[in-house]
Image: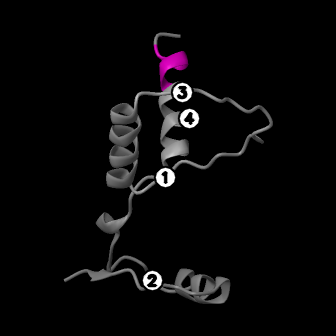
Amino acid sequence: MKRKLPRMKSDKAAEDLLRQDLSNLDFRQFKPVQFEFEPKAARVNMRLPEPLLDAVKAKAARLGIPYQRYIRQALEQAVTRGK
């Protein structure tokens, strides 16, 4: 039976884990994440209908991300789709 990956609270704990045999760990608990490397230098100010903003915030909460990041990801997907 595979065991869950333990929570690590330090880099040392992570390094110690990686020195072990990891074949008996259940990696299905991992979720994909995206890292945002580019600096955010430009600002955008827009007005939205309140129900739309509420829906955006609710969707972002379900995904476990801040709503502004969710908006940024939606914009990125919209402009890169069909390239």
Identify the image quadrant of the N terminus: bottom left
Mark pair 2, 3: CA separation: 53 Å
First to last magenta residue range: 76-81
- Chain-order first, disc 2 or disc 1: 2
Q: Quadrant of residue 51?
A: top left
**In the picture provided, is 55 more to the left or to the right than 74?**
left
**Local crowd at mark 2 within 10 Å, few (<14), some, or many (≥20)?**
few
> In the image, 44: left or right of 41?
left
Q: Which mark is residue 21?
A: 2
Residue at label 4? Answer: 72
Q: Helix, strand, or loop for circle 3? A: loop
Amino acid under disc 3: Arg
Q: How many marks?
A: 4
Do callouts 2 and 3 mark residues in contact (Cβ within 8 Å)? Answer: no
Question: Measured from the top left, where is residue 35 in percent x and y?
Answer: 60, 49
Q: Who comes first in sequence, dot 3 or dot 4?
A: 3
Q: Above or below — where is 33 with respect to 46?
A: below
Q: Residue 36 in the image: state x and y as whole percent.
A: 65, 46
Residue 32, position as x, y percentages in the image: 43, 53
Task: Give the CA separation, mark 1 to mark 4.
Answer: 15 Å
Residue 29 relative to residue 45: left or right: left
Residue 47, disc? 3
Position of 73 relative to 22 (above/below): above
